[in-house]
Image: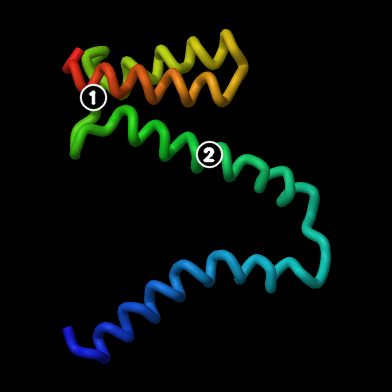
Amino acid sequence: MSSLEFFLCIAGMFLVTYLPRVLPLFLFSGGTISPQLEAWLRYVPPAIFGALVCSGIFLDGESIDTNISNPDLFVSLIVLIIALKTKSLFQSVFWGTLIYGIVVYFGI
């Protein structure tokens, strides 16, 4: 990789990480947004989080794995029960990490 290619690669990475953060500031800094757009934008973070979590749980390489022997699915169901019972993010993360480690280590 030449110096120019390296510089262009760094500049491209800068643009794709910096522009999505700064562009909304410039677009919406001058005024207010409509209530409909504001209501719609409230769904974006949960939708992105759901997409990331679901792809991590159900995708195994290029195939969809919905079998209960899938350790990600198995542990996520246990964590869901823990989260509903305790309503504690700390408890959910702690027990989920511990249970996942045990399931993967012992191959359950």
The crowd level at tag 1 (other Cα within 10 Å; few <14, some 14-19, many 20+) is some
Using the numbered discs, state the Cα–Cα distance from disc 2 to disc 1 in whole angstroms.
Answer: 21 Å
Residue drawn 49% across the image and 10% down it: 81
Name the residue type under label 2. Answer: Ala
- Residue annotated with mark 1: 65
The dot on residue 47 is 2
Using the image as rendered, state which of residue 39 and residue 65 is in the foreground. Answer: 65
Quadrant where the C terminus lies? top left
Residue drawn 22% across the image and 14% down it: 69
Residue 98, quarter of the rendered image: top left
Residue 53 % position (x, y) = 41, 34
Q: Is there CB contact under 8 Å for labels 2 and 1?
A: no
Name the residue type under label 1. Answer: Asp
In the picture, measured across the screen, residue 94 lies left or right of residue 70, that is: right
Residue 25 % position (x, y) = 68, 68
Residue 55, quarter of the rendered image: top left
Quadrant where the N terminus lies? bottom left
**Which element is circle 1 on?**
loop
Using the image as rendered, state which of residue 96 and residue 23 is in the foreground. Answer: 96
**Which element is circle 2 on?**
helix
Vertical order, 39 against 94 (above or below): below
Vertical order, 27 against 55 (above or below): below
Residue 50 % position (x, y) = 48, 34
Residue 49 % position (x, y) = 50, 39
The crowd level at tag 2 (other Cα within 10 Å; few <14, some 14-19, many 20+) is few
